[in-house]
Image (spheres, rainbow, N blue to C red):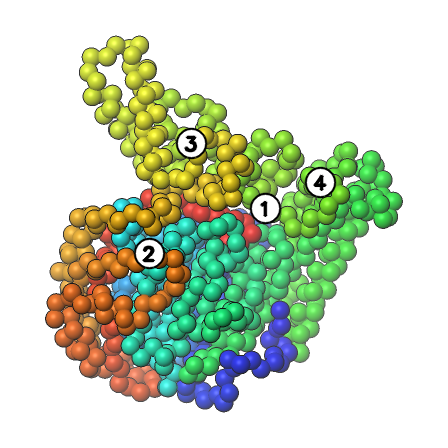
């Protein structure tokens, strides 16, 4: 990773001759994971501190806006402390008198809160004095959950209605699993202009990998682009696995349409912020990486950066900026067997081993501190103030194959208290299965690992076995009398991972209700029969649950399953405890008729015009359910939804729609605070509305979200 300090070599996409009035300046960051380890006495404030640094950098570099690619928060329900600080920082750094120079050409009400008059984009609200807007999609940690009156909401929704953040890429989600078969993912951009530069930002908040994979494969991810898309610089933001976790557990890099110029990839935590070309494609991919290490894995040890992204016309320039508030982190692996061979270490002598490991850790601490000093020296050269030294993160992975007795890693770590930030998890012991081969890559969190795996040591189990698997195994062993293990396990997972305190209650109530129903059906049973009846009913319900979830899972539960189930399903099985793995088998069959409910909800929305529509606002759009384009060939072509498709979709629409569009194109300038208008580039602002109608209402669209999301990977390595 090159740093901002040096002068990076010019690249083909670089801006040739820069004109400030045409250059959109963006501060690019992602995966801030605010709230990560917030109770840790040493590391608790790391994530928020770095977020503050990022906002300060935005101010310092005088950017037009800040762009984030998901996982702003680590917890789905950020703590009060967390929200308090985040809100305070956003208010502190992003409000002010600095004039906004990027004019919004897309509908400012796209994605706005239902039933309220204020726009979705904060700087379009005359009551707010925004200096540096922040745009973001959601990630897998802070994705929309719940089924309240407003539908599924996430923390970004809260920031959005507070006017502190512009939440984009909250894609339309199907109301039910049946609906999922007929809808795709619609991506409506935020369109901006500064001088002669036109910028389109297409956000796709995180969805489960299986779904994304299916949608992409079926060519159902539609990006609504302006007609003259070639004059736009198009950015695509997404938050998915880039690293292959399984056959459908990632998004291939070459999958996007050629009208995309730059892909901003959230979710992966290693910093690969320098844009990388993609074979056979015109676009580049940048992966900023997280701004805080949320696991002690190799990828997180790469120096963390954000970047200044400058766009002018169809050219762009990326200047990585190293983050200075990030703890230095060093990681190493030792194979004691090898040390024994090479240096004569006695594997039967625990004292000797401990002594060896201590020396190793001391060397790592020195290395980390040197890293820090280097970083400080570089910054000092650039005229930056010194930052006081932070305790480093140190991880030593120890292959203990052949060692008879290992010491207690926690006691070992205690000796380094005050010198490192993570004394409790400094050491990780593991045994390699084939003692001779040296595998440096330790795969954490393998879905198929069972807690009963005799080959694993306790530490390994703690580090690698997923909670979901553990819960499932436990429940299976309990032989629950009434409740099905699968449904229960899903509910527990929701409870744990998404902090949904109602998940279990909801599930139990529902399950009992339906059990009662089936027992009631047989009247006059005596008590002996009742038991049998219940057992049968339970089995039946479990079966229904499984079928409903359309899990490609084999019926047999427990540990045997994953290992021998063939490569195709091993991931699906674990990850997909939820109800939406049905995307896979969809190709062949016909789309089911859409649920009435959805249509109704959308219709309702159509009628509901905002009470106080500003003059510039686009006329109410037709909200009819759109015709479904159901070409499910294998072509993986995100965003191949240009005019052609748009026309196809619009064809059956009433004529009024087109009239509206024409009208929209000649909307008068927007209302804006006077001082801003004076400073903003050209005062005239047109609203372009190119998107076909039919956005489903949030409430309706997201009702089903609860079902949709039983989170995928809380993969420590890349979340
Ligand atoms: Mn993530």
The residue indicated by pointer 4 is 434
Instruction: Kindly tell me whether mark 3's CB lies below 8 Å from ligand 1.
Output: no
At a point 21% along the width and 48% down the height, the residue shown is 593
Disc 3 or disc 2, which is closer to the eye?
2
Which mark sits nearer the N-terminus, 3 or 2? 3
Whole-percent x and y of residue 200? 36, 74
Check disc 4 and report its element: helix, strand or loop.
loop
Instruction: Using the rendered image of the protein, determine whether residue 702 is visible from the camera's viewpoint.
Output: no
Whole-percent x and y of residue 25? 45, 78
Foreground: 429 or 380?
429
Instruction: Kindly tell me whether mark 2's CB lies below 8 Å from ligand 1.
Output: no
Check disc 1 and report its element: helix, strand or loop.
loop
Separation of marks 1 and 2 at Cα, in angstroms: 35 Å
Q: Which mark is residue 555?
A: 3
Disc 1 or disc 2, which is closer to the eye?
2
Q: Which mark is residue 444?
A: 1
Foreground: 653 or 617?
653
């Amino acid at each position: 990773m090159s740093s901002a300090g040096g002068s990076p070599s010019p690249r083909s996409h670089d801006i040739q001759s820069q004109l400030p009035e045409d250059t959109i300046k963006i501060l690019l960051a992602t995966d801030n994971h605010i709230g990560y380890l917030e109770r840790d006495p040493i590391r608790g404030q790391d994530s928020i501190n770095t977020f503050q640094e990022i906002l300060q950098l935005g101010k310092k570099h005088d950017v037009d806006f800040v762009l984030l690619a998901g996982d702003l928060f680590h917890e789905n329900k950020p703590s009060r402390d967390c929200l308090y600080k985040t809100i305070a920082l956003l208010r502190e750094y992003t409000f002010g008198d600095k004039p906004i120079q990027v004019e919004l050409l897309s509908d400012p009400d796209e994605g706005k809160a239902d039933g309220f008059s204020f726009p979705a984009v904060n700087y379009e609200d005359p009551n707010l004095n925004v200096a540096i807007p922040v745009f973001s999609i959601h990630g897998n940690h802070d994705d929309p959950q719940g089924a309240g009156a407003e539908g599924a909401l996430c923390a970004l929704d809260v920031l959005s209605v507070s006017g502190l953040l512009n939440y984009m890429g909250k894609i339309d989600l199907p109301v039910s699993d049946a609906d999922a078969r007929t809808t795709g993912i619609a991506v409506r951009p935020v369109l901006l202009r500064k001088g002669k530069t036109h910028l389109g930002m297409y956000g796709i908040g995180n969805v489960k990998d299986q779904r994304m994979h299916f949608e992409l494969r079926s060519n159902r991810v539609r990006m609504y682009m302006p007609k003259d898309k070639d004059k736009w610089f198009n950015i695509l933001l997404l938050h998915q696995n880039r690293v292959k976790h399984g056959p459908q557990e990632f998004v291939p890099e070459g999958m996007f349409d050629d009208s995309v110029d730059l892909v901003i990839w959230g979710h992966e935590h290693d910093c690969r912020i320098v844009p990388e070309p993609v074979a056979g494609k015109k676009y580049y991919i940048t992966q900023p990486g997280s701004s805080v290490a949320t696991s002690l894995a190799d990828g997180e040890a790469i120096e963390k950066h954000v970047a200044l992204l400058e766009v002018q016309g169809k050219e762009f320039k990326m200047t990585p900026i190293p983050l200075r508030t990030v703890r230095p982190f060093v990681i190493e692996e030792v194979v004691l067997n090898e040390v024994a061979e090479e240096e004569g270490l006695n594997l039967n002598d625990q004292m000797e081993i401990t002594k060896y490991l201590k020396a190793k850790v001391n060397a790592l601490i020195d290395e980390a501190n040197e890293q820090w000093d280097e970083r400080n020296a570089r910054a000092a050269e650039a005229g930056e103030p010194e930052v006081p030294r932070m305790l480093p993160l140190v991880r030593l992975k120890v292959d203990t194959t052949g060692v008879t007795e290992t010491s207690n890693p926690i006691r070992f770590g205690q000796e380094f208290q005050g010198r490192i930030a993570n004394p409790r998890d400094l050491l990780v012991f593991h045994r390699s299965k084939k003692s001779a081969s040296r595998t440096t890559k330790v795969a954490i969190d393998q879905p198929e690992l069972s807690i009963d795996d005799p080959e694993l040591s306790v530490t390994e189990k703690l580090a690698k076995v997923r909670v979901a698997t553990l819960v499932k195994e436990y429940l299976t062993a309990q032989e629950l009398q009434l409740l099905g293990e699968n449904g229960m396990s899903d509910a527990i997972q929701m409870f744990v991972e998404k902090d949904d305190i109602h998940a279990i209650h909801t599930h139990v109530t529902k399950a009992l209700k339906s059990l009662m129903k089936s027992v009631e059906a047989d009247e006059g049973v005596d008590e002996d029969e009742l038991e049998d009846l219940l057992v049968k009913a339970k089995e039946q319900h479990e079966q229904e649950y499984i079928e409903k979830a359309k899990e490609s899972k084999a019926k047999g539960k427990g540990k045997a399953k994953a290992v021998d189930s063939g490569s195709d399903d091993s991931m699906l099985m674990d990850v997909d405890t939820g109800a939406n793995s049905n995307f896979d088998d969809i190709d062949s069959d016909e789309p089911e008729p859409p649920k009435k409910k959805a249509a109704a909800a959308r219709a309702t929305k159509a009628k509901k015009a905002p009470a106080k529509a500003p003059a510039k606002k686009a006329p109410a759009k037709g909200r009819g359910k759109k015709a479904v384009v159901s070409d499910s060939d294998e072509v993986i072509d995100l965003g191949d939804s240009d005019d052609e498709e748009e026309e196809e979709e619009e064809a059956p629409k009433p004529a009024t729609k087109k009239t509206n569009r024409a009208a929209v194109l000649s909307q008068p300038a927007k209302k804006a605070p006077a001082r801003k208008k004076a400073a903003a580039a050209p005062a005239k602002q047109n609203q372009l509305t190119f998107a076909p109608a039919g956005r489903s209402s949030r409430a309706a669209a997201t009702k089903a979200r609860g079902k949709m999301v039983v989170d995928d990977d809380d993969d420590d390595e890349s979340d």
